[in-house]
Amino acid sequence: MAKQLLDEMTDDQLHAVEAWIKQKSPGTFLATDDNLMEIVREDQKVLASAGVTYEQIVDRLNHFVNAFKAKAQEAGPQDDLFLAFRCGYDVDSNYHVSAELSLGKEMCPLDDCEGSSVVYRVFNKLTGGEITFPELMPHLVRDHHFFEGNVTYRLDPGDAIRVMRLE
Ligand SMILES: [Zn+2]
Protein backbone atom coordinates (compact mmCIF):
# COMPACT_ATOMS: atom_id res chain seq x y z
CA MET A 1 0.00 0.00 0.00
CA ALA A 2 1.30 3.46 -0.86
CA LYS A 3 2.28 5.58 2.09
CA GLN A 4 -0.05 8.45 2.86
CA LEU A 5 2.34 11.23 3.80
CA LEU A 6 0.35 14.05 5.36
CA ASP A 7 2.97 16.71 4.66
CA GLU A 8 2.69 16.01 0.93
CA MET A 9 -1.09 16.47 0.86
CA THR A 10 -2.89 19.59 -0.27
CA ASP A 11 -4.86 21.66 2.23
CA ASP A 12 -8.12 20.22 0.87
CA GLN A 13 -6.87 16.66 1.25
CA LEU A 14 -5.80 17.40 4.83
CA HIS A 15 -9.24 18.79 5.66
CA ALA A 16 -10.79 15.57 4.36
CA VAL A 17 -8.34 13.40 6.32
CA GLU A 18 -8.99 15.47 9.45
CA ALA A 19 -12.73 14.83 9.19
CA TRP A 20 -12.11 11.13 8.62
CA ILE A 21 -9.77 10.75 11.61
CA LYS A 22 -12.09 12.67 13.92
CA GLN A 23 -15.04 10.56 12.87
CA LYS A 24 -13.22 7.24 13.03
CA SER A 25 -11.33 7.64 16.31
CA PRO A 26 -12.80 10.62 18.18
CA GLY A 27 -10.29 12.20 20.56
CA THR A 28 -7.60 9.57 19.95
CA PHE A 29 -5.31 11.10 17.34
CA LEU A 30 -6.76 14.60 17.09
CA ALA A 31 -8.54 16.72 19.68
CA THR A 32 -12.00 17.96 18.70
CA ASP A 33 -10.81 21.45 17.79
CA ASP A 34 -7.46 20.46 16.27
CA ASN A 35 -6.68 21.72 12.78
CA LEU A 36 -4.73 18.91 11.09
CA MET A 37 -3.36 21.16 8.37
CA GLU A 38 -1.83 23.56 10.91
CA ILE A 39 -0.41 20.71 12.98
CA VAL A 40 1.19 19.02 9.98
CA ARG A 41 2.66 22.27 8.60
CA GLU A 42 3.98 23.32 12.05
CA ASP A 43 5.61 19.94 12.73
CA GLN A 44 7.16 20.03 9.27
CA LYS A 45 8.72 23.43 10.11
CA VAL A 46 10.16 22.10 13.38
CA LEU A 47 11.93 19.29 11.53
CA ALA A 48 13.10 21.53 8.70
CA SER A 49 14.57 24.13 11.06
CA ALA A 50 16.41 21.43 13.03
CA GLY A 51 17.60 19.77 9.81
CA VAL A 52 16.16 16.45 10.96
CA THR A 53 14.14 14.02 8.82
CA TYR A 54 11.09 11.96 9.81
CA GLU A 55 13.15 8.84 9.10
CA GLN A 56 15.87 9.90 11.56
CA ILE A 57 13.26 10.26 14.30
CA VAL A 58 11.77 6.85 13.45
CA ASP A 59 15.22 5.23 13.53
CA ARG A 60 15.88 6.66 17.01
CA LEU A 61 12.45 5.61 18.32
CA ASN A 62 12.96 2.09 16.98
CA HIS A 63 16.45 1.99 18.46
CA PHE A 64 15.07 2.59 21.95
CA VAL A 65 12.10 0.23 21.51
CA ASN A 66 14.36 -2.56 20.25
CA ALA A 67 16.92 -1.97 23.00
CA PHE A 68 14.14 -2.16 25.59
CA LYS A 69 12.80 -5.40 24.11
CA ALA A 70 16.28 -6.95 24.00
CA LYS A 71 16.88 -6.12 27.68
CA ALA A 72 13.48 -7.50 28.66
CA GLN A 73 14.27 -10.70 26.73
CA GLU A 74 17.66 -10.98 28.43
CA ALA A 75 16.01 -10.65 31.82
CA GLY A 76 13.95 -13.73 31.00
CA PRO A 77 10.46 -14.54 32.24
CA GLN A 78 9.51 -12.26 35.08
CA ASP A 79 7.10 -12.71 37.92
CA ASP A 80 5.69 -9.25 37.62
CA LEU A 81 5.89 -8.05 34.04
CA PHE A 82 4.10 -4.81 34.84
CA LEU A 83 6.66 -3.90 37.50
CA ALA A 84 9.57 -4.89 35.26
CA PHE A 85 8.18 -2.68 32.50
CA ARG A 86 7.71 0.28 34.81
CA CYS A 87 11.19 -0.03 36.29
CA GLY A 88 12.68 -0.23 32.83
CA TYR A 89 16.27 -0.64 31.70
CA ASP A 90 19.34 1.48 31.13
CA VAL A 91 20.04 1.80 27.42
CA ASP A 92 23.28 3.10 25.91
CA SER A 93 25.04 5.07 28.64
CA ASN A 94 22.71 8.00 29.07
CA TYR A 95 19.18 6.73 28.61
CA HIS A 96 16.60 4.86 30.60
CA VAL A 97 13.66 3.26 28.81
CA SER A 98 10.53 2.00 30.50
CA ALA A 99 7.10 0.97 29.29
CA GLU A 100 3.51 0.79 30.41
CA LEU A 101 0.51 -1.05 29.13
CA SER A 102 -2.36 1.27 28.29
CA LEU A 103 -5.95 0.27 27.78
CA GLY A 104 -6.66 -1.26 24.42
CA LYS A 105 -4.82 -1.33 21.14
CA GLU A 106 -4.32 1.62 18.88
CA MET A 107 -5.29 1.19 15.24
CA CYS A 108 -3.87 3.58 12.69
CA PRO A 109 -6.84 5.64 11.42
CA LEU A 110 -5.38 5.82 7.90
CA ASP A 111 -4.75 2.17 7.07
CA ASP A 112 -5.82 0.10 10.09
CA CYS A 113 -2.24 -0.87 10.82
CA GLU A 114 -2.38 -2.15 14.38
CA GLY A 115 -0.26 -1.02 17.29
CA SER A 116 0.05 -2.77 20.64
CA SER A 117 -1.11 -1.17 23.87
CA VAL A 118 2.46 -0.48 25.01
CA VAL A 119 3.52 3.10 25.73
CA TYR A 120 7.26 3.77 25.95
CA ARG A 121 9.09 6.38 27.97
CA VAL A 122 12.62 7.43 27.00
CA PHE A 123 14.42 9.40 29.70
CA ASN A 124 17.66 11.27 28.99
CA LYS A 125 19.70 11.00 32.18
CA LEU A 126 22.07 13.79 31.16
CA THR A 127 19.42 16.43 30.54
CA GLY A 128 16.50 15.13 32.58
CA GLY A 129 14.30 15.39 29.48
CA GLU A 130 11.89 12.65 28.53
CA ILE A 131 9.41 11.65 25.86
CA THR A 132 6.60 9.12 25.88
CA PHE A 133 5.07 7.56 22.81
CA PRO A 134 2.80 4.64 21.93
CA GLU A 135 4.17 1.69 19.98
CA LEU A 136 2.17 2.85 16.96
CA MET A 137 4.16 6.12 16.79
CA PRO A 138 7.06 4.87 14.60
CA HIS A 139 4.45 3.74 12.05
CA LEU A 140 2.60 7.08 12.19
CA VAL A 141 5.82 9.03 11.68
CA ARG A 142 7.33 6.74 9.02
CA ASP A 143 4.26 6.07 6.90
CA HIS A 144 2.27 9.27 7.49
CA HIS A 145 4.72 11.89 8.82
CA PHE A 146 2.24 12.35 11.66
CA PHE A 147 2.99 12.92 15.37
CA GLU A 148 -0.70 13.09 16.42
CA GLY A 149 -2.53 16.27 17.46
CA ASN A 150 -3.03 17.83 20.89
CA VAL A 151 -3.91 14.53 22.55
CA THR A 152 -2.43 12.29 25.26
CA TYR A 153 -0.02 10.35 23.07
CA ARG A 154 1.22 13.10 20.80
CA LEU A 155 4.99 13.01 20.35
CA ASP A 156 6.15 16.61 20.15
CA PRO A 157 8.81 16.55 17.41
CA GLY A 158 10.84 19.32 19.11
CA ASP A 159 10.96 17.27 22.33
CA ALA A 160 11.84 14.13 20.36
CA ILE A 161 14.77 15.92 18.69
CA ARG A 162 16.07 17.35 21.98
CA VAL A 163 15.62 14.28 24.17
CA MET A 164 17.05 11.83 21.63
CA ARG A 165 19.81 14.29 20.70
CA LEU A 166 19.20 14.45 16.98
CA GLU A 167 20.44 18.04 16.64
ZN1 LIG B 1 -1.03 3.90 9.10
Image: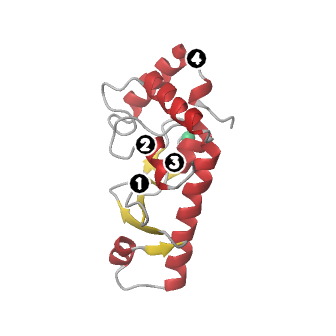
Which amino acid does the dot numbered 1 rest on? Ile
Q: Which residue is mark 3?
A: 161
Q: Which residue is mark 2?
A: 156
Mark 1: few/some/many CA within 10 Å (<14, 14-19, 20+): many
- Kindly check if marks 2 and 1 are in contact, taking CB atoms under 8 A apart as contact: yes
Q: Nearer the viewer, residue 62 or 124?
A: 124
Find the distance from the CA under tag 2 to the CA under tag 3: 9 Å
Q: Say which label, 4 or 1, has the lower sequence index.
A: 4
Q: Tag 3, which secondary structure? A: helix
Q: Which residue is mark 4?
A: 10
Tell me: is circle 1 under 8 Å from ligand 1: no
Which amino acid does the dot numbered 4 rest on? Thr
Residue drawn at (40%, 54%), measured in percent from left and top?
A: 132
Which amino acid does the dot numbered 2 rest on? Asp
Residue drawn at (43%, 42%), measured in percent from left and top?
A: 156
Mark 2: few/some/many CA within 10 Å (<14, 14-19, 20+): some
The percent coordinates of residue 63 (x first, y second) are 59, 62
